Image (cartoon, rainbow, N blue to C red):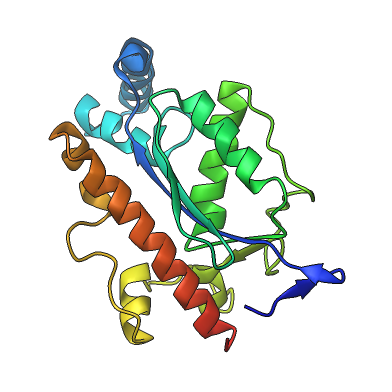
């Protein structure tokens, strides 16, 4: 890939993460939050219909209480690597070490989910992100974060396109043949950990191919 940046080859990191709901040791605190929300609604004369189980499941999409199961990434043309460790702090340290020299971070909905989640979990775990430039989340720009979802939609509001449908439209093929993101926790509970890692890796490969198509490479 002939990408050059500041008189040298660019280091583009393609990435994807898979996440899980909050671990058991946080459930007591989460029950207190759930009860507080229910009481607040009741005091306002409203009904709070979200069960604790539903509330808990939703934490998997929020880096405040959810946790990272794995991080898959690839630099330029290199093979896809998958970081997966029960020690989330160690996994994050390894990720930021790999990301230290990256010039550009590329992913699908990476600005609103993957990188935001990584930053949130890093703060909670006391892991300082290591990047060669300030990792700005400012909108309407393609550097240092190239968010495929927003770029495809030309920043015209939230796009309904999915990674799967965009890959198919571009003739790349689906990375969702065996599972999709909504099934990660079910697979985790069944002990199908390799399948989750393989799925995350496949998303990174699809992301890299889509990025190249979008940049006419």
- Residue at the spot 72% in from the left edge and 67% down from the top edge: 10
Q: Nearer the viewer, residue 150 or 106?
A: 106
How many discs mark residues in the rendered view?
0
- Quarter where residue 206 is shown: bottom left
- Residue at the spot 70% in from the left edge and 69% down from the top edge: 141
The location of residue 125, given as percent across then percent down, is 56, 22
The location of residue 61, given as percent across then percent down, is 39, 42
Q: Which residue lies furthest to the left in this view?
A: 190
- Residue at the spot 38% in from the left edge and 25% down from the top edge: 86
The location of residue 29, given as percent across then percent down, is 38, 12
Q: Relative to 6, say whether 187 is above or below.
A: above
Q: Residue furthest right?
A: 7
From the image, which quarter does the C terminus lie in?
Answer: bottom right
Left or right relative to 76: residue 36: left
Q: Which residue lies furthest to the front in this view?
A: 78
**Can residue 121 be seen at all in this image of the molecule?**
yes
Left or right relative to 56: residue 70: right
Q: Relative to 212, say whether 89 is above or below.
A: above
From the image, which quarter does the N terminus lie in?
Answer: bottom right
Q: Nearer the viewer, residue 133 or 94?
A: 94
The location of residue 46, given as percent across then percent down, is 30, 32
Left or right relative to 145: residue 66: left
- Quarter where residue 139 is shown: bottom right
**Can residue 51 be seen at all in this image of the molecule?**
no
């Amino acid at each position: 890939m002939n990408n050059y940046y500041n008189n040298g080859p660019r280091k583009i990191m393609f990435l994807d993460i898979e996440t899980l709901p909050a671990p058991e040791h946080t459930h007591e605190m989460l029950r207190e939050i759930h009860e507080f929300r229910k009481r607040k609604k009741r005091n306002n004369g409203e009904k709070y219909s979200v069960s604790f189980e539903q509330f808990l499941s939703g934490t998997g999409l929020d880096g405040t209480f959810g946790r990272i199961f794995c991080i898959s990434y690839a630099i330029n043309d290199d093979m896809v690597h998958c970081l997966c460790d029960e020690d989330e702090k160690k996994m994050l340290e390894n990720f930021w070490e790999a990301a230290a020299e990256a010039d550009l971070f590329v992913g699908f909905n990476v600005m609103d989910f993957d990188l935001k989640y990584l930053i949130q979990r890093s703060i909670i775990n006391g892991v300082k992100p290591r990047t060669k430039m300030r990792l700005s989340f400012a909108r309407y720009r393609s550097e240092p974060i190239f968010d495929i979802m927003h770029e495809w939609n030309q920043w015209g509001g939230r796009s309904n396109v999915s990674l799967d449908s965009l890959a198919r439209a571009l003739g790349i093929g689906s990375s969702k043949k065996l599972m999709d993101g909504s099934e990660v926790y079910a697979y985790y509970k069944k002990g199908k950990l390799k399948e989750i890692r393989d799925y995350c890796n496949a998303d990174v490969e699809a992301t890299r191919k889509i990025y190249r198509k979008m940049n006419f490479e």
